[in-house]
Amino acid sequence: MDLEMNASSHNGAIPADLSLSDTILDSNRHANKNGAVWKDVLLAYKSLGVVFGGLVTSPLYVYPSMNLSSPTEADYLGIYSIMFWTLTMIGVVKYVCIVLNADDHGEGGTLALYSLLCRHADIGILSSRNANTRVRNGQSNLNPRKQGKLEKFLERSIFARRMLLFIAVLGMCMLIGDGILTPAISVLSAIDGIRVPFPTFGKVAVEALSAAILIALFLPQKFGTSRVSFMFAPIMASWTFTTPMIGIYSILRYYPQIYKAVSPHYIVSFFLRNGRLGWQLLGGTVLCITGAEAMFADLGHFNRRSIQIAFLFTIYPSLILTYAGQTAYLIKNLNDFGDGFYKFVPKPVYWPMFVIATLAAIVASQSLISASFSVIKQAVVLDYFPRVKVVHTSQDKEGQVYSPEINYILMFLCVAVVLGFGDGKDIGNAFGIVVILVMFITTILMTLVMIIVWRTRLLFAGLYFVAFFILEGTYVSAVMTKFVEGGWLPFAVSIVLAFIMFGWYYGRQKKFEYEMTNKVTLECLSSLLSRPDVQRVPGLCIFYTNIQDGLTPILGHYIHNMKSLHKVTIFTTLRYLLVAKVAPNERIIFRRLGIKGIYGCVIQYGYADLRNPEDDDFVTQVTCSLRNHLESNYEGQLEGCSVQQEILQLEEAKSVGVVHVRGKTRFYIGKDSGWSDKVLLGFYEFLHSNCRSALPALEIPLLESLEIGMLYKA
């Protein structure tokens, strides 16, 4: 029988049971593939309401932001050609085809690129972070690779590493500035359309109505990206599909041959004809690509494929057709550029489009608001920003986050910009600087990722860098001429944010250096406990420490002053992982430290782990895990001390009482400290005293909590 089966299989026949199982497997794979495709399509639809709002509503303010003077048909053809190739080169080639592939654990943005570089090369600044993030120290040791000259240079030059961090931080600050300006200019431009049919509607009324709408926009952010996108996606879908329809109508009615402007020779003739004025007009045309960086910065809220699908099949065609229709109208109405959107809308559909435009402008702000939450979360995780409350609003997607503090600060600044500037042109000048500088910084960091992480050939990396350096560098030079006319605003915001981040980073680095220099080793702890004046008092102590390689200096300070330590002491480190939930058997990890009654403990949390009030209290969970560890693991067990004795000692200590000890450190800034330490560490102390605690809400009774203060000498 076996011989017949083998022979039949060699002759090409397939056993019935094998054929059936293969068919089932193939059908399952096909179903899974179809399910994944539909999931990406659904995410692409949702991304319309979050990621692309700023980009797809740019026709509202691009032409009004240009200071055109007696424009001609040839000028409009040149401007449209510039916008077409800008959208194609930056939107399609740079972001969709290249940059979106450079995510860091699903996250995007300039800080994600910097984090990705730090994990593949020793170019970070904070040593505590480098030790935990470098890929080379982990898996890459199994497959060593040769370092390139650029990588060696960056690792050896502290100046280059600091400049790299500065560039990444500047990109993050500019993106947050974008998050302030996008809502302001989008809503103000949309509401300003009401003055076309009602010229008596005053400027102050437009500003007040815009401010009220902005406040209403920020309030529902706490419900999370998924719910917000579900509400906003239909609005953006309506805008995305109606504006190109009006564009097609405008093309057919006013200028059917508009697509000849796709030829780049119209760009050349535009600059030859207009010279310096044409170069300055780039400050307005750059706004056509505003929001493109949000595709990358919002990557953590969705995924790469969904964003690519949404851009290539809806956003890009919509923008090309809408701008073509606007330009076709303006060619026949040369001086209507000051209100280049609403005047090209046919009168029968004016009010429906006004409603859609207003709603779309409100939704447009969401892309950069979500991006701001993402980059702040990345900065907090990397320890480059003061701890703020970060709420994960999705059980499935780690990147969907919300920060109440950041949300209300953005709301206040957006309203202040609308009421303070009022004029859309001034906001547009500030907006243009933010938009192109973030992209320029992304180009620099992306080139380093291509060389160091991807190991791209220098020829291809060089082509990428030169092409986009020239394109974006030209835009940068043009928008900088608008610095006095509103362009100073994003720099002011960035300087404030950068000072906050640098002050926090400087203080954290000084604290880390002090703790590493003065950490308590196990040998030192054993020596302290052997002193005759130090007593082991009854009870259970959970001593919190953020040092895993040794023990916090606060321990030595505590023993030296209290002359005691509890008979059972558990040194506990809380660790947050970039996973949704930590398995119960991996939540609490123990080890014996070689001293009677002294244990080390690491408690791990995922971003979606929630404490259930019905669960056992924190102390019960820790002691049960320690008991299980003692019963199943004999490593490090002391001679003459059985497992039963250890468990009995633990139970007795718990019955006597539990105390939670945590350190509260401050810097002592003496007269001999330099002025930089006095300023920066003083500022760090201010930030540290007003930021969130590093410890989560563990529901510890106040009577069981003890804080030990200690001064670190600066």
Image (cartoon, rainbow, N blue to C red):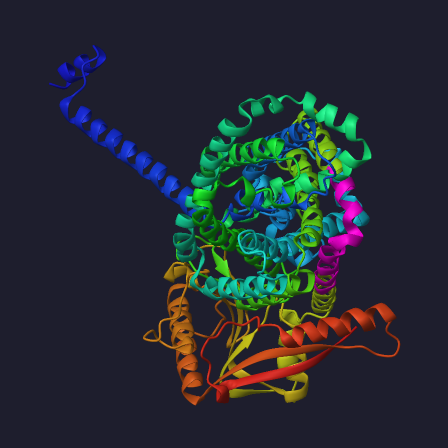
Q: Nearer the viewer, residue 600 or 192?
A: 192
**Residue 298 visible in rendering:** yes
In the picture shown, does residue 658 fall above or below 593? below
Tell whether position 63 is magenta. no
**Residue 103 visible in rendering:** no
On the image, the x and y values in percent for residue 287 come to 64, 43
Left or right: 8 as drawn, with respect to 714: left
For image coordinates 54% across by 56% down, the residue present is 198
In the picture shown, does residue 55 fall above or below 34? below
What span is in magenta? 475-500
The single residue placed furthest to the left in the displayed view is 1
Left or right: 293 as drawn, with respect to 270: left
The single residue placed furthest to the top in the displayed view is 11
* The N terminus: image quadrant: top left
* The C terminus: image quadrant: bottom right
Q: Assign the magenta stretch its main secondary structure.
A: helix
